[in-house]
Amino acid sequence: MPEPPMVLPATELKNVSDKISETIQIGASVRSLLEDHSGQGRFDLNWEVDAAVEALNVFGSRWTIEILSTLYIAGNRRFNEMKHLLKGISSRTLSDKLRYLAEKGLVERIVTDGPPVRVTYRLSSHGMTCGRLLSPLVAFMKIHQGSIVGA
């Protein structure tokens, strides 16, 4: 856990908590809608679990969530800026993971003509949407783990 924790005014912490609660309700509604169609024909529970695992697979690989979080929180970054923010990642791993995330449509590689030629990485619209969808979960976990506290 990062030290010290982020301290939010009580009203702001309540606003964040309210948004998380709204997200939980929306998530339950989405789950209910999908549940209405699972178990029918080939869309049984095994299919639904397999589809969920496949959909989330990109987030399960080491360093991918860290890279996506960095781009979501810090914005567009050049390679060495990302390497500096991601403590412990090798250049080779960062390069491989950026290529993988670009292939999956989550990250875009932007080349600016030089001299010198500059390469910047940013979240694609799909990657940004994933970041926005995950943001309430991240906030919930930060509060739960004590990284964010109320004043």
Image (tube, rainbow, N blue to C red):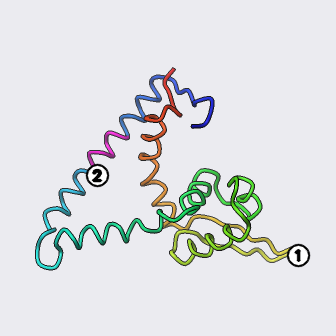
Position of residue 76 measured from the top left corner of the image (x, y, whole percent):
66, 60
For the image, the number of numbered tags is 2
Q: Which residues are magenta?
A: 20-26
Q: Residues within 10 Å of mark 2 (few under 14, many from 20)?
A: few
Q: Quadrant of residue 90?
A: bottom right
What type is the residue that disc 1 sits on?
Pro
Residue at horizontal 49 percent and vertical 38 percent from the top? 142
Q: Quadrant of residue 6?
A: top right
The residue where tag 1 is placed is: 115
Viewer-proximal residue, 114 or 145?
145
Camera-nearest label, 2 or 1: 2
- Whether residue 92 appears in magenta in the rendering, the answer is no
Residue at horizontal 47 percent and vertical 29 percent from the top? 12
Q: Which mark is residue 129?
A: none
Query: What SS does tag 2 mark?
Result: helix
- The correct choice, above or below, for 50 with respect to 73 in the image is below
The residue where tag 2 is placed is: 27
Query: What SS does tag 1 mark?
Result: loop
Q: Are marks 2 and 1 in contact (CB under 8 Å)?
A: no
Q: Quadrant of the N terminus?
A: top right
Position of residue 144 measured from the top left corner of the image (x, y, whole percent):
43, 35
Specify whether 110 is left or right of 47. Answer: right
Viewer-proximal residue, 66 or 151?
66
Label 2, label 1: how far apart the Cα atoms are:
48 Å
- The correct choice, above or below, for 22 with respect to 9 in the image is below
Residue at horizontal 11 percent and vertical 73 percent from the top? 40
Position of residue 55 measured from the top left corner of the image (x, y, whole percent):
38, 69
